[in-house]
Image (tube, helix red, strand yellow):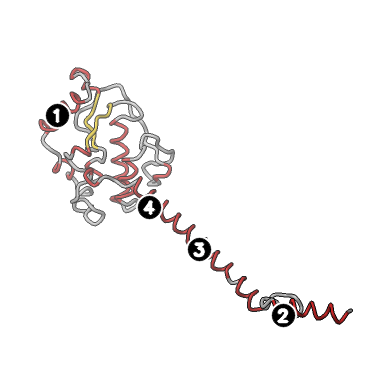
Amino acid sequence: MNAGLAHTRFTRLSADPTRNANGAPPLALVVQRGSTQPVRKTRRAALVLGLAAMLALRFTDAYALDSEMLDERVTQQSIGETICRPGYADAVAPPFDEWMARKEQMLAERGIDTDDGVAFALDRRVPLVLGGSPDAPANLDLLPWAGRGGERRKARAAVMLKRCVCEGKLSLAQAQAAIVGNWSMVYSGFGQTSCDVSRLDVVAGGDDGQGAEHDGAR
């Protein structure tokens, strides 16, 4: 009786090529099955890296400046001969009459009465002192003179950023990104002795006057 059972068991094991005489799968098969784990981990890591790269590209694109806003003559290498040179902004700015005509045109386009136009400044999104285009439409906007988001405050921020660039404490690209971004939400700590744009803060001046049409930042 025992001999018959043993024969039957031996016959079943012999018919299964994936098992040895002890009923366990052969070592080769165990190794083959286990070898799929590193492959899966590698694929998963590649997928994560790919997604991270895509997010990085989208983040970069979101903060990229429109090239039409910039003056191609001003680069990190040329700041010594351009924005850091005394009188540069006055030299590249368009004539005053032309500038005022452009402002009146934009006031009309925005539906702002000419009599109310004195409260507004024709703003350059990237000021001349930071390498902005003198007259490209993409670089022009209207801003009120007064207030936390006004031209006076922005002019001060631009001048301080220019100082940091010319002293080598800040790159031109960083300064341009700071002034084009939400610059009015300035951070405490940016002053005459600091160029930390992560803590940018520009001291507000008085808002009691209308100001001149030519501002210090251009």
Few, some or many residues within 10 Å of mark 1 (<14, 14–19, 20+): some
Give the percent coordinates (x, y) of residue 131: 23, 46
Nearest to the observer: residue 93 or residue 33: 33
Q: Is residue 44 above or below residue 198?
A: below
Nearest to the observer: residue 140 or residue 54: 54
Q: Nearer the viewer, mark 4 or mark 2?
A: 2
Please state, as top left, top right, bottom left or bottom right, where the N terminus lies in the image: bottom right
Residue 57 has which mark? 4
Please state, as top left, top right, bottom left or bottom right, where the C terminus lies in the image: top left
What residue did someone put label 2 on? 14
Report the side of 140 relative to 18 (left or right): left
Q: Nearer the viewer, mark 3 or mark 2?
A: 2
How many numbered marks have been drawn onto this rendered protein structure? 4
Residue 43 has which mark? 3
Look at label 4 and name its amino acid.
Answer: Leu
Give the percent coordinates (x, y) of residue 58: 38, 49
Among the two numbered marks 4 and 2 on one chain, the one whose residue lies closer to the N terminus: 2
| Residue at the image position 43 percent from the left and 41 percent from the top | 189
